[in-house]
Every structure is written in structure tokens, then in C-alpha cells.
Amino acid sequence: MIQTESLTKKFGDILAVDRLTLEVAEGEVFGFLGPNGAGKTTTVRMLTSLIAPTSGSAVVNGFKVGVQDQEIRRTVGILTETPGMYDNLSAEFNLLVYANLYEVEDPKRQVEKYLKLLGLWERRMDEAGSFSKGMRQKLAIARALLHEPRLLFLDEPTAGLDPEAARLVRDAIEELRKQGRTIFLCTHNLDEADRLCDRIGVFKTRLLVVDSPANLRTRLFGRKVVFHLASVDESLAEIVRQMPFVKQAQVVDNKLVVSVDEPEAHNPDLVRALVGAGAQIQFVGELRRSLEDVYLQLVKSN
Amino acid sequence: MKKIRIIIQKEWAEVFKNRLIISTIIFMPLLFSALPLIILGFMPGDDGSVDAQLTTELPDQFAQYCGEELTASECYKVFMVNQFMLLFMMTPLIIPVNIAAYSIVGEKTTRSLEPLLATPITTAELLAGKNLAAAIPAVLGSWLGFFVFLGGTLILSGSPQVVRALMDPMWWLAIFVAGPLLAILSVNFSIMVSSRVNDPRVAEQLSAVVILPILGLFFGQISGLLLINSRLILIMALLLALVDIALIYVAVRIFQREVILTRWK
Ligand SMILES: Nc1ncnc2c1ncn2[C@@H]1O[C@H](COP(=O)(O)OP(=O)(O)O)[C@@H](O)[C@H]1O
Ligand SMILES: [Mg+2]
């Protein structure tokens, strides 16, 4: 659905996006994760034909950026960073304007469908300006969906929302994902990326790494198994270290933390060895690094 | 076409919530037609005593232009009425400035420009919608003023001759051709300014600049330097048409989506 090749954007001397090469598959929810000023919005603007790349190329929905811009605008949906509603017009009229601009066949019906779907139907006659932030964001999502785009760009959809509103918006995104739409989700919220995305690209002017949330954790920290023991000392750690597949073993409080590549394959052997050495195992689990650790490490080192 | 229409509808829905703009559109033309009517109402009747005196006060060419069939008093009234023509031509120039000046910069300040430009609307469609949304009320407003003036003249002057002067091709040319052309001039200029600045008030003030030359024309004419006649109006209309075409071309050219979207804070 999206392929970019060395996509670059400069604003004068400021390098906002540096040689971004990326592929997003159909039906995928791709998280574009990066701190403020990373160049996420700039990337989305290039991919939606709002601004022209300085160099490099991109194909969106099968259309070339800079060549078939009109087709791109016609077929993608975008939730801009700020909703930009016409505040003194009704919610319904706001959507009707966009349904017409997107050349929707039956604007009235389509507007009704999305107002109902996002729970705004009762308030359709109210001015958009009277809406809470969360409702306005939902209205903006409805606006992005009117022409039934298969590819949707969401630029920080939950930024600035209270937790309750953010949850409602996330539920709406979850719903879109179930419908099989491809979603390019910009966010600086790790938790959100972790929960919603199939793959995450960590981005700060350059693309630092792309992978699934689970793989990102493994790739950066390896996998670790934690044994909670009634009592533990270095001798147990030493026994474990002798085993060929163990990369590292450490005693922390009354826990033994062992690094292995494939816990599924090696845990039985580990357990057997420890029991044989007289260890009293209380729990066994995997030490999960949060995505936040991954992210902080990546962003810090760049 | 559908997109242009929806832009116009949207603009009107927004603009007509603003009482100030509605009153400009309705009251300004009415004021401009009331002024000459009041003056007309206070002018002396046709008793012959003032004829000689008045005739000498009229510019020579004008006396000729009046011809034989008008009494001097009637001729004077026709002269006065015609002097106010430029006032009517100012209405389509002034009314749309408010609406047009706000049209792009307003979308910038509410951040609604980005989602708008993300839709498959072409620059020409967007500008056409914005143009018409500002020009149509201005033209209709000035026509309303003209018809009120026409009716008022009939009642107050009591002379079909004077009214006939208003039915002159010169007037129709001025109101129905030059008027809309002036509206387009004013609207395009304001929209160009509007897409270049970031503050609606600045846009309005800068746009007011277009009105000055016409004001100059008006006072030049009042002080007798210029005499309005069909030739002058025709030349003006032709010039306006050319200027309008050039302006529209430039407006579309300088409306670079990316620059307008990003170069402001
Ligand atoms: N119109 C612009 N002119 C100049 N610099 C810009 C412009 N837009 C963005 N930038 C710069 O480009 C960088 C990326 O910005 P942005 O894409 O908005 O980041 P993000 O969305 O990830 O917060 C920032 O350093 C920002 O200051
Ligand atoms: Mg951003």
C-alpha cells in the first residue's frame, strides 16, 4: 500500500525527513513512532500529497507521489494533527462538505452512517465548536472515512485527549483495523503503538528500526527467563552458565535471570538442571522489557 | 461544479452567521441609494425660476448632453443622479472585501486548510468557490441598492425623464457589467492578500487598498474633473475585464498549496 524510497524533505536548512525507505503492506497497522519534531507529520504530508518531497520517491495506493497527486488525495483518508473543523457549523454540515469534496456518491447517507457509527448522531445539529476534544477527534475520524479509503493516515489521534477519550478513539481505531483497513499511525505514545500496531517503525528524522513490537523487544534486549527461587546463590548461576545455550545468568535478589534465545526449547532443560541441583522453584516467567525501554534506548543513542 | 457549489455553501453558512457581514451586504447598498435620494428630494421643483441659474452652473458638455427635451431642472437632476453612479460602483467593490479577506487566512487560523487541501479539490475549484462566495452577495447587494434608487428616483423626482436617464445603457453597463467586474477585482485581490498573510485584520486592511483608486475617481468626478459617460464606463469595463483575467491567472499561480500550508506559524 505504501512504498517509499529514500524519501527526503528539507525545509531550508532543516532536514525534517532523511532518506526514508519503507514498505507498508495491505491490511497492516503500521506504527510510526517518534518524539516531537521527529518528522512524522512531514512524512504524512508527503504521503498524502500535501507537500512535495525534496528528493526520493513514494508510491501510495499504487499512485506516485508528485505525479498522481489527485488520485492519492482521492483515495486516502487523513486525520490531520489538528482536527481543523469549521467550529461554527454543525457536525453534520462539516461532514457533508467533505463528503461532497471527496466525491461521495450519496453524501447524506454516508454522513449518517459515520455519525451513527462513531456515536455522534444525536449531536449532529450541534456546532462542532461545542464538542469536547474527544468528540471532535471522533468527528475528524468520521470525516477521514467518508469516502471509504482503504488506506488511512492518523497523525497522533490521541494526543491531548484525556484517558477516557483516548480509549474511545483507540477503540475506534481497533474497529477500523478489524475491517481490514491499512493504517499508518503516527504516535509518540508507546503504549498505543504496542497495543494497536502490527509493526512499528521507530523514527527520528531517520528510520531507526522497523519490526513487530515483540521482535523489537527481543532484538534489543534478547529474551530473559526469570526463576523465582526459595533461596539462590552464585553456585546455581554457575551451574546454569555451563549449559551451552545460556548466554548469561545473573542473581538478582532471590531470582535467577537467564538469557536464552528460545525459552520454549530450553526451559525444560533449565528447570531439570536447577531441580537436580536442589533449587526450590516457586515461579518461572519471562522478563518482558517494556517497549518504552526499547524506544528510550534507540532514541537516546541517536 | 459540485465542489465549487459546496465551497460556496460552506462559506455562506459561515459568513452569514456574522451579523456585521450581513449588515454590510444589506445596509451599505441601502445607504448608498439613500444618500442621493435625500439630495434629490431636497432639490427645487420645476418652477422655471431657477432654470437659468442652474443651467449656467452645469458643465457645458453636460448641458449639451441633456438636449432640448429636458428642462434645466430635470437636466440638473439627471446630472446629479449620474454623479452618484460611481457610488453604486463602489458597493460591489467594498462589500466582498470582508468575506474574501477572511477566506484563506481564516482557514489558516482555524487549521481547517490542511484537511481541505488533502481532499481532491483543485486549486482552481477552491478559488472559484471562494471567489463566487464573496462576489455573488456583493453583486446582488449592489443590484438591490440600484433598484431601490431607481424606485426612489421615480417617486421623488416625479419626472419620468429623470428615471429614463437611469435606464440609459450607460447605467446598465455600469451596474450589470462593470459592477460584477469590480466585485471580481476586489475579491481576487483580497483572496491573494489573504493567502499571503497570517492575520485576518491585516488582510482586510491591505485589501482596502483597492478601494482607494475608485474613491479617487469618485471625488475627482464630484469636483468636476471627470464626466461620467457611456464611453468612460465602457472603457472602464474593458480595462476591468482585462485586469480581472490577469488577476485570476496570477491568483491561481501564486496559490501554492505547500507554501500556504506550511509557511506560517
Ligand atoms: N513548514 C515548516 N518549515 C520549517 N520547518 C518545519 C516545517 N514543518 C516542520 N518543520 C520542522 O521539521 C521537523 C519535523 O517536524 P514535524 O514533521 O512536525 O515533526 P513531528 O510531527 O514528528 O512532531 C521539525 O524540526 C520542525 O521544526
Ligand atoms: Mg506531528
Image: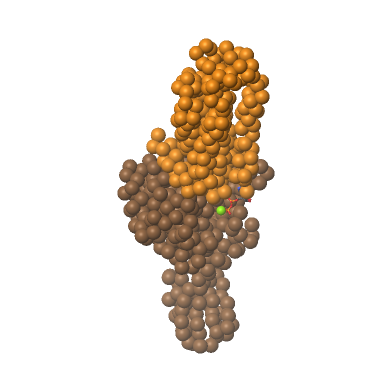
Q: Which residue is drawn at 51% across and 88% down?
A: A230
Number of numbered discs overlaid on the protein picture = 0
Q: Is residue A206 above or below residue B123?
A: below
- Front residue of B159 and A229: B159
- Front residue of A150 and B210: B210
- Front residue of A217 and A128: A128
Chain (orange): B
Residue B27 rendering spot, x and y as whole percentages: 51, 40
Q: Which residue is drawn at 42% across and 64% down?
A: A168
- Front residue of A38 and B39: B39
Q: Which residue is drawn at 50% across and 77% down?
A: A226
Residue A14 rendering spot, x and y as whole percentages: 66, 46
Residue A61 rendering spot, x and y as whole percentages: 42, 43
Left or right? Give the position of B103 relative to B225: left
Q: Please tell me in which quadrant of the rendered image residue B98 appears.
A: top right
Q: Which residue is drawn at 54% across and 22% down?
A: B47
Furthest toward the right, the residue is A13
Left or right? Give the position of A124 relative to A188: left
Which image quarter holds the N terminus of chain B?
Answer: top left
Can residue A105 be seen here? The reply is: yes
Can residue A75 be seen here? The reply is: no
Q: Please tell me in which quadrant of the rendered image residue A76 appears.
A: top left
Chain (brown): A
Q: Is residue A284 above or below residue A291?
A: below
Residue B62 rendering spot, x and y as whole percentages: 59, 16
Left or right? Give the position of B21 relative to A264: right
Q: In this view, does A238 lie above or below B240?
A: below
